[in-house]
Amino acid sequence: MKRLPIWEIMDRMQAYGRTFYDEQDGVLYSNYTCGAFEVDFTGSLLAASFCAIPDTSPSPRAAFPDQDPIPREDWPWISIFLDGADVPTRTICVHDREDIVLFFSEKAETHRIKIVKLTENFRTALGISAFTAEGTLNIFQRESHEVIEFIGDSITCGFGNSASDVSHEFEASEENGWLTHGAIAARALELEPRFVSVSGISVAKSSAMPNLYGMNELYPYTDRIIQDKLAQKRGSPSVEYLPFDFANHPARYIVLNLGTNDASQIYFRPDKKQAEIDFRENYRAFVSTIRQLNGPKANIICALGCMDYYLFDTVKSIVSRLRADTKDKNIFIFKYNKMMNIGPDAGACLHPSIHRHQLMAQELVTFIQNLPQE
């Protein structure tokens, strides 16, 4: 058996999503939904050494004075895939400093092995520090696919999509990024998915809602969330955030599905007229940032749904104004069909179930296939 530190085998693996390498501990993180690691392996046994950070957020029930906070540690979940299959061989929970067997056989075999993070960033973190092998990691020959990027909130993350009870709160075991509408649509379009999504997030941070970040504070950086978590753990006074390398990791399509939590912010703001003005300014500024960072060729799809449509007309008018002012023909508006709050559509906390995500994926695929092609 041979232990292979991650820094020694970077040329023999492929990481997907926005990845951050922590030089101090020698850990490669891929924390956003569907962050992944892939290797070509020949041998009889391959295991990975994981570093993980759990979600310790108290239950929302802790906000009520007659109920005590419920201590919890909700760890990230992964699925393991062999040879490009759509169905995993295993789906398991991962704890910190845990070694997990990815593949085992009685005799040497050759397989492409992929580890996919099912849970979202902010709530859970996942990195790999080493592989242990009875065999060889081969030079990785990556298949080139164009990228479709998904920027969003809990809907994009797949919050509660595997839950069987609408009354459930967040549980990592019930969030399956592989079966979100974004991941399903990416596979149908033969594109590589890349997620930048966090439950509860809005375009910009607001005092009306207790969010730690606005999406405009996260998007320019590779993974500001893990850098903040590591800095807090180490007592670092400041953090120099690593910018994401947009030039070398371009996206062909960018699906922006924000506005659901922004509507909640407006609801709780005393001056709702000013709150809507702020949203309009923040949304337009953020779309302009997306365009600036990704260049003129990326197709930006400003979407909303499938839970709330309060701001859809506002988003539509912003997009129309942007197209007129900038002559940008590669920005579009898209509305997902509304989910039902009962039956097969509903997952935890009345979020879309896997069934509804499948329908959303079909809608998005059809929309993208009908876009004008260069």
Image: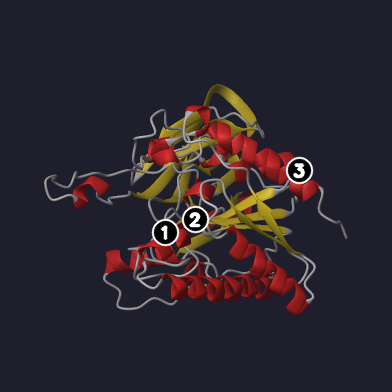
Residue at 59% from the left image edge and 28% from the top image edge: 87
The one nearer the camera, 155 or 174, is 155
Helix, strand or loop under label 2: helix
Percent from the top left, x then y, of residue 46? 51, 35
The one nearer the camera, 89 or 347, is 347
The nearer-to-camera label among 3 and 2 is 2
Question: Which residue matches tag 3?
Answer: 366
Q: Is residue 226 visible?
A: no
Based on the displayed image, in which of its 4 quarters is residue 44 positioned?
Answer: top right
Q: Disc number at residue 264?
A: 1
The quarter of the picture where the C terminus appears is bottom right
Residue at 54% from the left image edge and 49% from the top image edge: 156
User: Residue 200, relative to residue 317: is it above or below?
Assistant: above
Q: Is residue 86 visible?
A: yes
Helix, strand or loop under label 3: helix
Residue at 30% from the left image edge and 74% from the top image edge: 236
